[in-house]
Amino acid sequence: MKALSLFVSFVLTTFAAFAQSGPASAFRVGAAKVDVTPAESELPKNYEGILDHLYSRAIVIDNGATKAALLTLDAGAMPDQLWQNVAKRAVVELGIPEKHILMTATHSHSVPRGAGTGLEEKVFQSLKLANEKLQPSRIGYGAGVSYVNVNRNLIDPKTHRWWEGPNYEGPSDKSVAVVKFETLNGDPIAVYYNYAMHAVTVGQLDQVSADAPGAASRYIEDSFDDKIIAVWSTGAAGDQNPIYFQQTFDLREIRIKEYAKRGEDISNAMPPGGQGLNKKDTTVAKLMSQQKQMILSMGQFLGEEVMHVMRGMERMQVTDRIFGGQKTISCPGRRRTDSGRAGSPATYEDADPVELRLSLVMIGDIAFGAVNGEVFNLIGQRLKKESRFAQTMMVTLTNGMARSGYIPNDAAFGYYTFEVLSSRLKPGCAETGIVNGLLDLMDEAEKSHR
């Protein structure tokens, strides 16, 4: 009996050791960030300095058999060439399959397009450093709520036409998806959070800034004594603004009156940035100072909610599932033949079809569904409702930039808003095409995991 007992003990011990050495225990994660702020000498003439620094933040995940990467860049968009070049290097030099990579833009409106030497190399270096820091890890998912966003399309009470402003009753997803990565001892490595809001608060300052997304990530990182990398991802924010935006509207009114004195009506066509504002004027200076404070406030509010969700994660686990897939859908296109920002119907002519790139990365049962454009909020909400995975988020402005302009949901094509009027998409295709396309990729993920 003693010999049998020893044998049983040996078998159980061996089985346990084997289970621990299988794919799940090989789950490793690394994270890093690299400063990508352009030098002041590289800024375009309309930029007046640097308000805060820009970063490329990356998380690399390894299950022992393959890898995935989640990267976010403080930029207005993710250019196709940048995404393609960095992804190709990641395949060759880091062994990360291209379909397993999500490269997202924060969509800050305070980042000069194409500014800064060596941007591509710096973005790649953030992936490389994250890959070098791989260590045994666990992953957890949670969801919180934040009220710093608001639907930005409403009927103006004076003109009774569509215009941009806080629509408190309009569709707006307040949820914050949070994915936490930690060591097996519980030490923080990274957090990836997803929220639907435009980064437009300080766009009229004409200074380089990562806006509210950057402020939120910096706040989280500082709260952990910089022992964590906090990676924002842009949700379905095509029609979502910061709720605290009054200073921006006040500045617009000042600018409209200034142009009117010169005989130019810009009430239905906003010039970019702070063009036309007298920044030495005391009222203008005060409003701009408040804008600077506002992104810090919103960053703190959002960062606090992310950390609240992280604290509540009691179930952290390792996983062997990493899946990546991509597909392209094509929708009928149109070209606008008149002008005007909002309020009245536009005229169009037929144009070439518009292609939209869809991506899906699965880490365990967490589904990161991605689109390479600016997607209206109801499309993201529909995806989450119809997904077979409870832990689903929509990540936009990812893996390149579609030539679609905004991507409204079907019902929104009846609104004469600036996003809808400028969209190069005909109605009736994109919403269902995006949702069904990502659901199809989720089906592929399920089949591959059986």
Image (tube, helix red, strand yellow):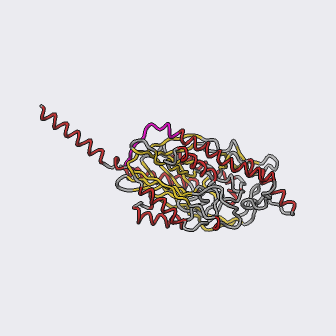
* Residue 328 visible at all: yes
**Residue 41 falls inside the magenta stretch:** no
Looking at the image, which is closer to me, 304 or 103? Answer: 304
Front residue of 429/149: it is 149
Q: Main secondary structure of the magenta part?
A: loop
In this rendering, position of residue 363 left or right of residue 41:
left
Residue drawn at point x = 62 percent, y = 59 percent: 76
Residue occupying the far top of the picture: 1
Image spot of residue 41 (x, y percent): 64, 67
- On the rendered structure, is 40 left or right of 161? left
| Residue 171 visible, this angle | no
Q: Is residue 313 left or right of residue 271?
A: left
How many numbered discs sit on the rendered protein?
Answer: 0
Residue located 62% across and 51% down the image: 237
Please provide the residue range marked out in magenta: 309-321
Residue 60: which quarter of the image? bottom left
Position of residue 303 measured from the top left corner of the image (x, y, whole percent):
58, 44
Is residue 317 rendered magenta in the image?
Answer: yes
Between 372 and 49, the one lying in front of the other is 49
- In the rendered view of the protein, which quadrant contains the N terminus? top left
Give the x, y percent position of residue 135. Answer: 39, 50
Q: Is residue 13 left or right of residue 290?
A: left
Based on the displayed image, in which of its 4 quarters is residue 413 positioned?
bottom right
Expressed as whole percent of the image width and height from the top left, the position of residue 261 reads 87, 60
